[in-house]
Amino acid sequence: MTNSEPPLQTIQVQNIFPTDLPYANNPWKKNVLLIIHDVYQDFNAFPLPYGYLAAMLQKSGYSVEVYCMDVFHYTNEQLEKKLFNSEYDLIGAGFLPARFEETIILLCESVNKHKKNAWFFLGGPGPTPIPEYMLERTKADLVLLGEAEHSLVEVMDAKLGKRKLADIKGIAYVENNEIKVNPRRPVFRGLDSLPWPAWDLFPMESYTKSWKMAGQDIEEKSCSMLTTRGCTDTCTFCYRIEKGLRLRSLPDIIAEMKYLVEKYKITFFQFVDELSTFPRSRVFEFERLLKENNLNVKWVCNSRAPLFDEEVAFSLKRAGCVFVNIGVESVDQEVLDEMNKRCTVDDNIKALQVANKVDIGVGLNFIWGFANDTKETLWKNVEALKTYNRFDQVRTIRPPTPYPGSPLYSEAIKKGILKDPDDFFKKFKNSDLITINFTRYTDEECAQMLFEANKELVLHHFRNTTGDMEEAESIIEGYRRLYFEKDYKFRGARRYDKTSREKSTNANSQKSTIPTTPTVTNIENNNLNQIQKEPALPTSN
Amino acid sequence: MAKYKIIYDRKNCTGIAVCSMVAEKFWIMNQDDKADLVSSANIGNDIWERIIEEDELKQNLDAARSCPVRVIKIVDEQNKEVE
C-alpha cells in the first residue's frame, strides 16, 4: 500500500441472518440439499413434493438448496462435483419405483461417495413400502415413510442433536449396522396448515414454460398444484403412501392460485391430485369461487367415472377445466371387479359419453393384463378407446405393474409369482411391458396381443388427426422394439399434440360424428366384429 | 317424522375418510386413523349405533354409499336396510 492510496476502512456489516438459526453466520452453507432426479424428458412439471418439503424446512428455520437434475439434465458426475465442493447436514431424493434401477441406484452411489458428514435420506412411493430393502440396497442412511413434511424437519432437528431418531415417527434408519423401522405417523389431515411450496428456490422459468398438457396453448405458463391428497378408493394396482382422501380448503386453494397468477403469470393449472372432484358439491363451489375471484384460468384435473356426470362436467368446463383424466381401466365388469375399481362398465361408458357431450378433453386410461382379462376384453377396450377417442392424446393400453406396496404386489407374492422387492426390480423393465404375468397367456402371447392392440390404436389416432402416418409408424416401431427386441428406452406413445386435437376437432365437426354416443351393447357388437378381425397369436416363440 | 339408525362397524374401517367429507357433522377422523360416529354408542364388538332424523338421512346415506369398505349401514324403523 502506498501513501497515495486511501486508508482501508472498517465497514460495519449488519448481520441480516438471525443468529439463532444454524449456519446463521454462513449464508453459503445450507442445511439440506434436495435432489430432483432426471426423468429424461424435456417437459418437467414443478416437483411439488420437494416444494412442500423445502417450504416446511424453511418455515422451521432451516436453509434449503434444490438441485434440479430434471430441468438441466445434470449428470451424476456433475452432482458429484457439486457435492465435493459443498457441505450439508442432510441430502435427500425422492422417487417412484419405476425409476429405481434406471436412475436412483447410480445417483445413490454418487451421493454416498461425497456426502461427507451429511445424512442421506430417501422418500416417496419408491422406498416407503420397502424401507429395509431400500436401505440395504442403496446404503442411504434414512428412509422417510409416507408424506414427509413433518418427519424431515424432525430428522433435521436430530442431525443437530435436538432429538433422537428413535423418537421420530415415520422414518427407517440404520443404527450400528442395524435397520430400525419406527412406527408410521398418523395420516396428516391439516393440509391448510402446511406452507405453500417454496417456488422461489426452483427455476420457475423452466418449470412454468416446459410442461404442456392437452388443451394448453404453447405460450401459456403452467404450474402444478395439489388441491387434495389421496383417493377415496383402493384399486389393486395402485399404491399410495397414505390412506384415504384429504382436502385442502377452497379459499386456501384460491389464494394460492391468485398468488401464482400474479407472481409467475400462470394461466394454466395442472391439478395433479389423484382425485380432484370429490365430493360433488366441492366442484360447484370451486366454480363459484373461481368466478367470484375473477380467476379466468384453464386447468386439468383427475376424476373417477362414477363422479363424472353431466352436471359435474358442465361445472368443470364453465370453471375453465379443459381436460379430465379418468381411470376407465377396462370395459369388462369382471375385470373392473377384480381390480376393486368400485364402478360399473355403465359408469365408464356414461362418463365417456358425458365428455363428448360437454366437449371437454378426456384422458382415457386403460389397463389390460389381469387374471380375468382375455383376448376379448383387450379388444373390447380397443373398441371403447376408438369409439370415444376425442384425440386429445395418443391413448394406448398398458399392462398393470404390481408396484411394491400395492394389493397386486401382495397378490403376486401370495401366488408365488414374485419373491420379494429384489425380484420385482429385476423383472421390472418398462411400464409398457408385462412385469408379472397374471393372465392365462404366455409372456410372448401378451406381448403380441398388446402390440397388435396398440398398433391399431396408434394408426386410428393418426388416421383421424394429422394423417402423419410416418409418425404413426415410428411409434409402432418403438413398440415393436420394446415388445420383441427388449429396447427398454421406449417411453410410450402419449402425446400432448395441439395440432392433432385441432385437426381431429375440425375433421369431426365436418363429419358431424361428435358426439357419438353408442351404448354398451353397441360396443359389445363392435367388439364382436373386431374380434373376428383380430390377428392370430404367434404360433412359436 | 321417520327415524333411522346408523350401524357402523368401526373395526373394519380403513380410514379412507370419505364419510368425514360428505357428512362432516356426523363423522370425524380419530388419531388412530379410523372414523368416529359422533354421539354414537358402542353396542359391542366395536359396532357403533346412532339414531338419526329423516332430514339427516341424505348426507349419511352419501357417507354409507361412498365408503369403499362398506362399514356404514343405515336401517329404517322396520330394520330394513336403506340403500
Image: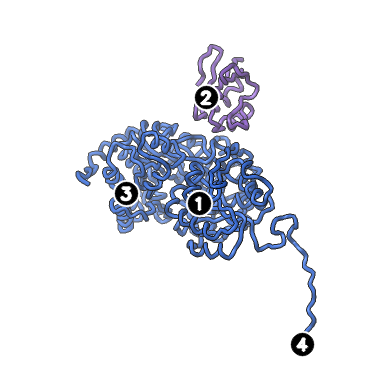
Residue with the mark numbered 3: A460
Q: Residue A2 has which mark?
A: 4
Choose the circle earlier in sequence order: 4 or 1: 4
Residue occupying image coordinates x 44% and y 31%? A342
Q: How is the image coloured?
A: by chain
Indicate the position of residue A42 as horizontal and vertical percent values.
Answer: 46, 59
Q: Are marks 2 and 1 on the same chain?
A: no
Q: Secondary structure at mark 3?
A: helix
Residue with the mark numbered 1: A139
Q: CA distance from mark 2 to mark 1?
A: 42 Å
Residue occupying image coordinates x 62% and y 48%? A155
Q: CA distance from mark 2 to mark 3?
A: 45 Å
User: Identity of the amino acid at label 3?
Assistant: His
Residue with the mark numbered 2: B71
Q: The residue marked by circle 4 belongs to what chain?
A: A
Chain A rendered in what hue?
blue
Q: Quadrant of residue A539?
A: top left
User: Identity of the amino acid at label 4?
Assistant: Thr
User: Identity of the amino acid at label 1?
Assistant: Lys
Q: Are marks 2 and 3 on the same chain?
A: no
Apparent side of residue A370 relative to residue A319 in the rendered image (left or right)? left
Circle nearer the viewer, 3 or 4: 4
Q: Secondary structure at mark 2?
A: loop
Circle nearer the viewer, 1 or 3: 1
Q: Are marks 2 and 4 on the same chain?
A: no
Indicate the position of residue A140 as horizontal and vertical percent values.
Answer: 52, 51
The answer to whether A122 is drawn above or below residue A312 in the figure is below
